[in-house]
Amino acid sequence: MKILIVGTLNGQVGAASQIAVKRGAKVIHTDDIREGLDTLRQGKGVDLVLVDIQLDIETFISNLNAERINTPVVACGVATDAKAAVRAIRAGAQEYLPLPPDAELIGAVLSAVAEESHAMIYHDPAMDDVVRLGKQIAPSDASVLITGQSGTGKEIMARFIHRNSKRKDGPFIAVNCAAIPENLLESELFGHEKGAFTGAVARRIGKFEEANNGTILLDEISEMDPRLQAKLLRILQEREIDRVGGKKPVPVNVRVLATSNRNMEQSVAKGEFREDLYFRLNVVNLQLPSLKERPKDIAVLAEHFIKKYAAANDLPVRPLTDPAKRKILQHSWPGNVRELENTMHRAVLVAGPTEIDDEAIMINGQAQAGASPQSGGQMGTGNPGDFVGQTVADMERKLIIATLDHCLGNRTHAANVLGISIRTLRNKLKLYGEEGFNVPAAGGNP
């Protein structure tokens, strides 16, 4: 893990750095926010930022968000400065670390950030061949196209390949091509020079340069604009990128992995995706089975998510009752592992003190049973008569908001479950908000 410390930390920089180094981290230090932002713009693969609470953390995080630099931020300050800690959390810091630094506490923070949330958890034979092939081709530099329904764990597989490759000590950089507006994706991938366009206040290293000597994952690549597809093809052929506004190409040594939840051959046939790029990416294809096709994994994954979210919310780990187990085993899980994860997260939060009963397993919009009409989330009981008198637009709105609530506000996950692009979802949510409907707050990926 690489940590960036920004500020003096009330003279505790040395102590914090030594503790982090003993825990296996590499530490970079800058004195102020400006230098910290410059370091992150250079794409040095920072995994965590510790920021002095006396600095303007709100401005720092707003700059990170504006420039789409997705690095966790932890505020640090004297334990008695409660108001400053609250301001930092409200500004977007993920944690508050009191000073002077405590070895166990710093270790816990590092462990939380480095948590192996990308482990391949499976018991069902349907996954055996896929995992075996993934491990077999991992040591090569071949491009890999990972396909499967939304929520099946395509990014998990990509990280598995990276961890088992010769590049495992290099960076792993993931880019969601569907979640970034088209006019920003080129800069996000290839970087830009200062002044290349309005808002380019400094040179920014793109994700390809950031992934140099490592692996880049192009998530949902089928959503990429055809113009960028042509540029990506050139990168795969020439192994060099052009920054937006740059004057000369920059060589890169990157292995490219890509994912899609679409039928790529159909996309090629329809002219939506370049055939030559498809063949470049599809040196090896890994097709992940749906959760319905790997039923023996349902209970195993459910137990894993219960432990994960109990720990994250400081709650006891409670067992599933037999009715709850039957309920999750009987469901078809159209949203796959992601839907199961969200369902178990919610169950951990609403279950009783000693066990997780079937009432806590809210599936297929059951969580919306008490929603008010103005929230736009109630879908009715499922009887055809419930829908009489409602327009298609009304039903669409209710379905979208109910799905978003089910996904705990995660826009990307909801769009995948609904089978629409993230851009379409954002536009509809903006419209619903303007019309006065309650839209669930963003959670996870915006």
Image (cartoon, rainbow, N blue to C red):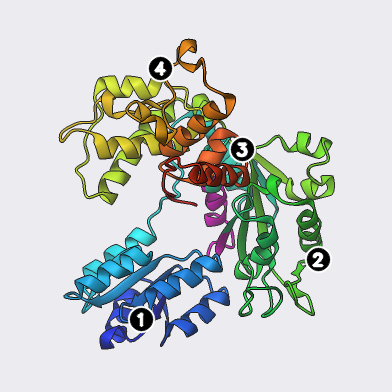
Q: Label 4, on which residue?
A: 381
Upstream in sequence: badge 1 or badge 4: 1
Q: Secondary structure at mark 2?
A: helix
Residue 55 - label = 1
Q: Secondary structure at mark 1?
A: loop
Q: Amino acid at mark 1?
A: Leu
Asked if 6 appears above or below 431 in the picture, the reply is: below
Q: Quadrant of residue 212?
A: bottom right
Upstream in sequence: badge 2 or badge 4: 2
* Residue 151 image point, x, y percent: 52, 38
Estimate the spatial distance between the alpha carbons at disc 3 and disc 2, rounded to whole Å: 34 Å
Q: Label 2, on which residue?
A: 238
Q: Rate crowding at label 3 as few (under 14), some (14 to 19) or many (20 or more) other CA atoms within 10 Å.
A: few
Q: Is residue 261 left or right of residue 308?
A: right
Of residue 112 and residue 78, the one placed in the foreground of this image is 78
Asked if 158 appears above or below 151 in the picture, the reply is: below
Upstream in sequence: badge 2 or badge 1: 1
Q: Quadrant of residue 233?
A: bottom right
